[in-house]
Image (cartoon, helix red, strand yellow):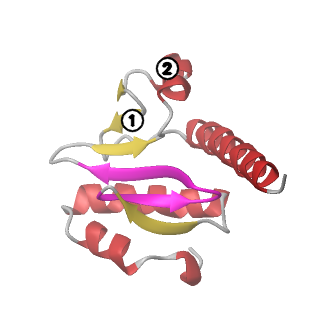
């Protein structure tokens, strides 16, 4: 992961997790940064979040699960068959640390979210320029 995009606050959140969740989420974090190398990190509403033209995706853990916060319930709903048997609720996909999300699903989510954010950012810029 690029040093400049790492957040000490996100490091602290991950460090406080049990090993299984910490390892799974660090792997997810590294994957997300490989897919969007210019993204930065922040804690948003208590959740480690990648930022690219606005909040992109977040990630977190409960006692037994990890979560990818997609932030778009419609996108998660469109992927229900592909993410099965994992559980989804709203804009979040839940997964066991030992059974991470497949790379193709992560790539589809990130591509869609980058596109959404870039279009929204472009539209906001255009409205502001009038």
Give coordinates of residue 107: x percent, y percent.
Answer: 63, 43
**Quarter where residue 16 is shown:** bottom left
Tell me the SS state at disc 2. helix
Neighbor class of circle 2 (other Cα within 10 Å; few <14, some 14-19, many 20+) is some
Neighbor class of circle 1 (other Cα within 10 Å; few <14, some 14-19, many 20+) is many
Confirm whether the magenta stretch covers residue 53. Answer: yes
Q: 10 left or right of 55?
A: left
Tell me the SS state at disc 1. strand
Residues at marks 2 and 1 touching, judged by CB atoms closer than 8 Å: no
For marks 2 and 1, the one nearer the N-term is: 2
Please name the residue shown 43% across and 51% down the image. Answer: 58
Please name the residue shown 20% across and 47% down the image. Answer: 62
Residue lying at the far top of the rendered structure: 81
Q: 8 left or right of 116?
A: left
Residue lying at the far front of the rendered structure: 130
Q: What's drawn in magenta, residue-wise?
A: 46-61
Residue lying at the far right of the rendered structure: 130
In this view, the residue in front, 72 or 78, is 72
Residue 92, which numbered label? 1
Mark 2 highlights which residue? 77
Location of residue 78 with respect to 111 vertically, above or below: above
Q: From mark 2 to mark 1, how far is it between C-alphas?
A: 10 Å
Please name the residue shown 43% across and 32% down the image. Answer: 91
């Amino acid at each position: 992961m690029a040093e400049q995009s790492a957040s000490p606050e996100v490091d602290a959140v991950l460090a406080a997790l049990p090993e299984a969740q910490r390892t799974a989420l660090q792997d997810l974090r590294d994957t997300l940064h490989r897919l969007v190398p210019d993204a930065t990190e922040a804690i948003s509403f208590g959740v480690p979040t990648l930022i690219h033209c606005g909040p992109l995706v977040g990630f977190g853990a409960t006692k037994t699960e990890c979560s990818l916060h997609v932030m778009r319930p419609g996108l998660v709903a469109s992927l229900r068959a592909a993410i099965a048997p994992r559980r989804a609720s709203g804009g979040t996909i839940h997964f066991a640390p030992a059974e991470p999300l497949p790379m193709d699903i992560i790539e589809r989510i990130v591509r869609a979210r980058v596109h959404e954010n870039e279009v929204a950012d472009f539209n906001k810029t255009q409205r502001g320029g009038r």
